[in-house]
Amino acid sequence: MSKLTFIIANKSFIVRRGLVSTIEELPNFEVVKEVENEINLFKAIDKLTPDFVIINFEFYKSLNIINLNLLIEKRKTKIIKLVDRNTDNDFFKETDFYIDINESKSSIVGQIKDIATPFLESENISINNSILSNREKDVLRYIALGFTNKEVADKLFISIHTVVSHRKNITKKLDIHTVSGLTIYAVLNKIIDIKSS
Amino acid sequence: MTFTKDMKMADLIHKNYLLLSIISRFGIPLGFGDKSVEEICNEYNVNTYFFLDIVNSYSNENYITDVQHNNFSIHSIVRYLRKTHKFYIDQIVPEINCLITNLYQNCFQQKDNVKLLLNFFDEYKNELLIHIKREEDVVYPYVLNIENAYETKKISKKLVAQMKNYSINEYLNEHSNIEEKLLDLKNLIIKYLPPTSDYKYRNKVLAKLFQLENDINDHSRIEEKVMAPKILEMEKFLFSHFSIDKQNSSDE
């Protein structure tokens, strides 16, 4: 099986090492380069064609986005942004992948897996792809009952970023995009009882 | 394949029978004999190139309009778009409603669940109606006014004010994605509603949903790729011709 490759872009040595050791514990995931400035990042993407670049949000904002997009578009490299609770909420509208850095280790590993696994030998995975994890079912239950992202986060003791990322995965797995569609799915699959809703 | 003005009108239908509903929207009835597209269009006072653009983009989503011939008016585009709205409201939406109701009545095990789908479709219908109303009440009058100003080289104060606050660009940005619910409904019926004792109506509902989706996508394509670019050009002309200052539009 082929490996998924990562570049870690971060100014902080400690953060880079933390990410490298977390990622390398996962089978089939490999960090091919650590970089700390724009020039080296662009060079590394150009040379190594990684599947993912993990980059903290502040660093990302300082980059020449047009050049970056040109680089990654051809190479199908995906950007994963590191965020924390202080990150501006607006930014979630424009980004696809992100990891909340304040979460526990298991949650961070889960987030990285959720993002990256679909890109691993996709034809094999699609068979199991539509099965929701227990956590996703929890999130789906509350969404179907009409709770907001914030409320779901509070109820499940997770951050709002994690809820958003669960929702994206649910929608992707089920191919259902609206809340009312998800509600009907939840009823059909007895995730919620129609009388309780 | 691309349809051309010299083809027989009857062959269009043989190639893609879904064009039937499009042809009726132009007020062209069946019984063409061996007449060509151009002959029939002339007979019914339809701009041939506009007609060809519509049927071609309907049959092939990558079709690009022939710029040499796309001098038809905004007026004719809007008239066609209004007719498609009418087709949704008067025909296909009631048909789907009726088919889901039939499915409901012919089911034994999944009755409660089919009822949910019926409610879901109801929600969708309301959203569609709101979307249509907004286009008919706001967008179409606006584009017609722009065309009028462009042609007469006269502009009203009201339109100037409107142009400062609103551009067809914003319309493109906000062009709401009403297709999502339709997609969900299809998936619920195909994938997630457990087997029902009735399959006839279930299949028919699906076939109609696909047709509606196809038609709505085409409708949006015409708005976004045919109508909006023309309006954009006209807006640009009007801004410079009447030296309208765009700056003070930014207060939100």
Image (cartoon, coloured by chain):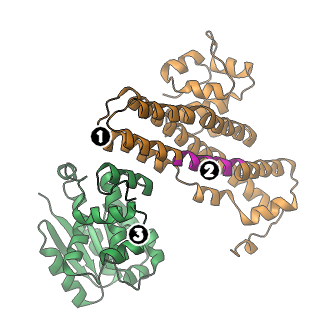
Chain colours: A green, B orange
What kind of residue is marked 1?
Pro
What kind of residue is marked 2?
His
Q: Mark 3 points at which residue?
A: A95
User: What residue sits 54% from the left and 41% below the top?
Assistant: B216
Q: Residue furthest top?
A: B33
What kind of residue is marked 3?
Thr
Q: Mark 2 points at which residue?
A: B131
Chain letter belonging to callout 1: B
> Does B132 appear in magenta?
yes
In this view of the protein, can residue B44 be seen by the observer?
yes
Is B49 or B146 nearer to us in this picture? B146
Q: What element carries label 2?
A: helix
In this view of the protein, can residue B8 be seen by the observer?
no
Residue B189: x %, y % from top left: 37, 40
Residues at marks 3 and 1, CA–CA distance in whole angstroms: 36 Å
Residue A77: x %, y % from top left: 30, 65
